[in-house]
C-alpha cells in the first residue's frame, strides 16, 4: 500500500511554513499596519501549525486532524490577508508590478495550502480503524506486505 500523500504533505508543510514566515516579514516591512497586530496574527497562525506539523511529520492522531485542518485554513486566511494588506499603503504602489507578481505567487501558494488540507482530509480516512497511525511510509508498506502474506490486518 503506497500512499504518495504522506511524502507530498511533508514537503508542502515546509514550503507553506517558509512562505508564512516571508509573509510575516513582508507585512512587517512593507505595510503600515500595527506591528503588534501583525505579530499577534503570526503567533496565532504558527501556533496552529504545531498540530499540522505533528499530523504531517510525526503521526496521524484522530484528535489532532481537526486542529490541523483549522491550522491550514488559518494559514490560507493569512496569505489572503497578506495579499489584501499590501494595497493599504500608498507608497507601496510605486512597486505595482512586483506586487502583482507577488499576488500571483500567493495564489499559487494558496493552491498548495489547499492541496495540503485536502491531503490531511484524505489521510484522515485511514484513521477509521484506529486512533493512531505513524507517519512513516516504510512502516505502512511493511504492514501492508505482512497483511498480504498472512491475511492479518491491524
Image (cartoon, rainbow, N blue to C red):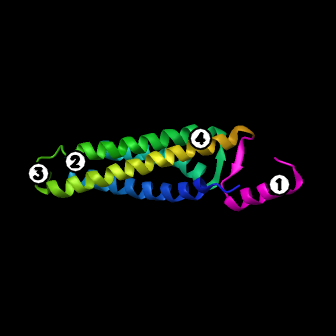
**Residue matched to label 1:** 148
Whichever of callouts 4 and 1 sits on the residue coming sooner in the sequence is 4
Q: Do callouts 3 and 4 mark residues in contact (Cβ within 8 Å)?
A: no
Number of the label disc, if any, that sits on residue 15: none
Mark nearest the camera among 1 and 2 is 1
Mark nearest the camera among 4 and 1 is 1
Q: What residue range appears in magenta?
A: 130-154
> What x and y, as percent, mark residue 144?
77, 55
What is the CA distance from the residue labelled 2 to the residue labelled 3?
10 Å
Instruction: Work out which residue is located at the far bottom of the displayed protein and give it.
Output: 138
Q: Is residue 111 visible?
A: yes
> What x and y, as percent, mark residue 137?
67, 59
What is the CA distance from the residue labelled 3 to the residue labelled 1?
64 Å
Whichever of callouts 1 and 2 sits on the residue coming sooner in the sequence is 2
- Judge by depth and name the residue closer to the eye, 79 or 116: 116
Q: Secondary structure at mark 2?
A: loop
Whichever of callouts 3 and 4 sits on the residue coming sooner in the sequence is 4
Was residue 141 drawn as part of the magenta stretch in this picture?
yes
* Left or right side of 23 for 50: right
**Residue matched to label 3:** 91
Residue at 60% from the left image edge and 55% from the top image edge: 6
Image quadrant where one finds the N terminus: bottom right
Task: Give neighbour class at mark 1: few <14, some 14-19, many 20+ (Cα, 10 Å).
Answer: few
* Left or right side of 113 for 137: right
Is the residue 137 above or below the residue 38 in the image?
below
**Residue matched to label 2:** 86
Residue at 58% from the left image edge and 59% from the top image edge: 7
**Residue matched to label 4:** 65
Task: Give neighbour class at mark 4: few <14, some 14-19, many 20+ (Cα, 10 Å).
Answer: many
Q: Do callouts 4 and 1 mark residues in contact (Cβ within 8 Å)?
A: no
Amino acid at each position: 500500500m503506497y500512499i504518495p500523500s504522506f511524502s507530498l504533505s511533508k514537503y508542502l508543510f515546509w514550503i507553506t511554513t517558509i512562505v508564512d514566515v516571508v509573509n510575516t516579514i513582508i507585512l512587517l516591512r512593507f505595510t503600515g499596519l500595527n506591528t503588534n497586530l501583525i505579530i499577534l496574527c503570526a503567533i496565532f497562525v504558527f501556533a496552529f501549525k504545531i498540530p499540522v506539523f505533528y499530523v504531517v511529520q510525526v503521526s496521524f492522531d484522530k484528535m489532532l486532524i481537526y486542529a490541523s485542518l483549522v491550522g491550514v485554513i488559518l494559514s490560507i486566511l493569512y496569505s489572503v490577508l497578506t495579499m489584501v494588506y499590501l494595497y493599504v499603503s500608498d507608497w507601496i504602489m510605486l512597486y505595482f508590478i512586483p506586487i502583482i507578481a507577488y499576488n500571483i505567487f500567493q495564489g499559487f501558494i494558496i493552491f498548495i495550502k489547499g492541496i495540503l488540507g485536502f491531503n490531511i482530509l484524505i489521510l484522515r480516512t485511514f484513521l477509521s480503524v484506529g486512533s493512531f497511525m505513524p507517519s512513516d511510509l516504510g512502516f505502512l508498506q511493511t504492514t501492508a506486505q505482512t497483511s498480504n502474506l498472512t491475511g492479518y490486518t491491524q
